[in-house]
Amino acid sequence: MLDGTEILTSAQMRALESRAMASGTVTGLQLMERAGSAVAGQIRLRWPVPGRVTVLCGPGNNGGDGYVIARLLHEAGWRVRVLGLPAPPGPDAAQMKDRWQRIGPILPLTRAELQQGGGPHLHVDAIFGTGLTRPPTGEIAQLLRHLAGFGGDLVAVDCPSGLCMDSGAMLGQSREDAQYLLRAGLTVAFDSPKPGHLLGLGPECCGRLVIADIGLHDWRVTGADDPPAAPRPLTEAIWPEFDIPDSRRPALSAQKQAQWLSRRGSGRGHKFSHGHALVIARGIGHGGAARLAARAALRIGAGLVTICPTGSALIEHSAPPDALMRKQVNDAEDLAKMLADRRITSVCLGPGCGIDRASDLLPVLLASARAAVLDADALTALAMDDTPFRGLHGNIVLTPHLGEFARLFPDLARRLTETPDSGPAYSKLDAARDAAARSKAVVLLKGPDSVIAAPDGHAAIHSAFDIPWLATAGAGDVLAGIITGLLARGLPALDAASLGTRVHAKAARLFGPGLIADDLPDLIPQVLRDISG
Ligand SMILES: NC(=O)C1=CN([C@@H]2O[C@H](COP(=O)(O)OP(=O)(O)OC[C@H]3O[C@@H](n4cnc5c(N)ncnc54)[C@H](OP(=O)(O)O)[C@@H]3O)[C@@H](O)[C@H]2O)[C@@H](O)CC1
Ligand SMILES: Nc1ncnc2c1ncn2[C@@H]1O[C@H](COP(=O)(O)OP(=O)(O)O)[C@@H](O)[C@H]1O
Ligand SMILES: [K+]
């Protein structure tokens, strides 16, 4: 696996904390002190001159962290005002609350009190964290609405309150059109990113995300989840405003990627040992999408790439790149003949291919058991089939955007649009995993938060909210080509989809705004140089 940083769900995080505490090596109180001190430390790093701060403390352990932050900032010379609730929290948070009360008062956690603050200063949101199970109501909801207008000087503890850490949805709010959103300038979360930091509204709400190490690594035993869960997802790349301590960086996997990508430089082998990819094109006048894919497959390092339009359209593909080979495929019979050549190691079907042609060619392609990317028209063709997933296998990557996903998996897509009224809410990660399990193929559910999932539950999240200019016509065709090229080179489907997504996004990031899809393939060499170090 080309793995990245582990992501934990809220339940997995709780299980990790419980394991650590059960070991007798660390107490909940110590973990809370570490968490609070990590947040206070980040605040002092970013705002080195002590100022005024209001700390908003909720009813649980997130509030407990807030009382620690209040105390530590007070000790560092800040003028601290604390708003909290009268009810006693759990034992650890209660102790932290007591310690604060020896320093200063606790004012009511109300909107009216919040508005009394006066003048510019920092606010710390320690109201709800991983324990949010239902939408905030009443006075706290009023207060959160008010906080939503605060912007950059809001620091969130673990997450902005109201965010479901498992999905990136705001509980009780429409996923597309939230009534109010807290937009923190800084979010300090503990041990690992949670899916909600990376998906949906999460990145917009969290602002700069810092993952603080609170010393739980010794209890991070893979496979020892309680409750048992699917394999832990991995973060893929993360938008630049993401900070993770060195101890949690996936150094080994970066090395593995670099090694794999530069394998071509070993001096052994010939072009066929780097794979031969076919990109299916269509009749005359529809060649652009397939050409983008083919160019990308060449640039990512497939040994040979052949574009396969119908005979009448061959002429359309006579322009450079001259490295691209052309061969007509008029119908399923032609494709079957081509695929008899075992040196063809992957196929891209869908970009600019036409739905009817995709429907005709799909059975032959699936029967060949070749590694393949099914994109665009091939996904629509699948969705029109009575048995859409018959013949799919683990070496196929489906690359739907949300619209195509809704055609293939209408029930899963519907769940993703429902307003969540309890947590953990159904997430894009859940949907991609369910889709992969159902289709038996690797599913890459695209968007600013792309999720890549395999039928066995292995998954990665690629969060790329910083490159909105990648949403440009043809970008998906280039991605399909990159993944096809990686498959041709022999990378397993999950790795090909996740590395392909990473390379694609890096190319977009390198170019910056003004990008058109045609620019992407020629940026791949520089991305490869960067990745290979
Ligand atoms: N465990 C550890 O060792 C460590 C944990 N750490 C910190 O703890 C946080 C998790 O703490 P947590 O589990 O206490 O949950 P939290 O997010 O504070 O909120 C839950 C409280 O709110 C309540 N509640 C829920 N929804 C509600 C609503 N809509 N409206 C009103 N009330 C609502 C709920 O009560 P109930 O659902 O029972 O009514 C409960 O009282 C985590 O994010 C991190 O910051 C760190 O210190 C590191 C060590
Ligand atoms: N807002 C966004 N920010 C970053 N990347 C995005 C955004 N929206 C879409 N993308 C990415 O851009 C590409 C668009 O692909 P797709 O929707 O298939 O477009 P097309 O069919 O025009 O090629 C995908 O890789 C997707 O993950
Ligand atoms: K919070």
Image (spheres, grey):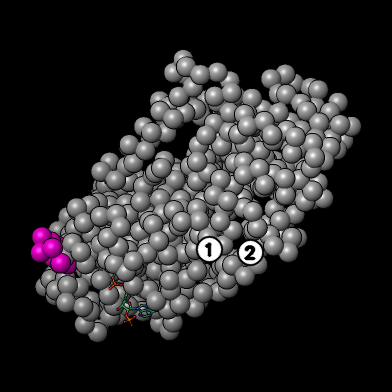
Residue 152 visible? The answer is no
Q: Quadrant of residue 139?
A: bottom left
Name the kind of residue labelled 1 in the image. Asp
Q: Residue at x 65, y 67 (%)?
A: 410
Q: Quadrant of residue 76?
A: bottom left
Q: Which range of residues does the magenta coloring cover?
A: 22-30
Local SS, label 1: helix
**Residue 409, numbered circle:** 2
Residue identifier under label 1:
434
For residue 312, above or below residue 449: above
At which x and y percent is residue 350? Answer: 72, 45
Name the kind of residue labelled 2 in the image. Phe
At which x and y percent is residue 368? Answer: 66, 43
Local SS, label 2: loop
Q: Residue at x 40, y 50 (%)?
A: 234
Q: Are marks 1 and 2 in contact (CB under 8 Å)?
A: yes
Q: Earlier along the polypeptide chain: callout 1 or callout 2?
A: 2
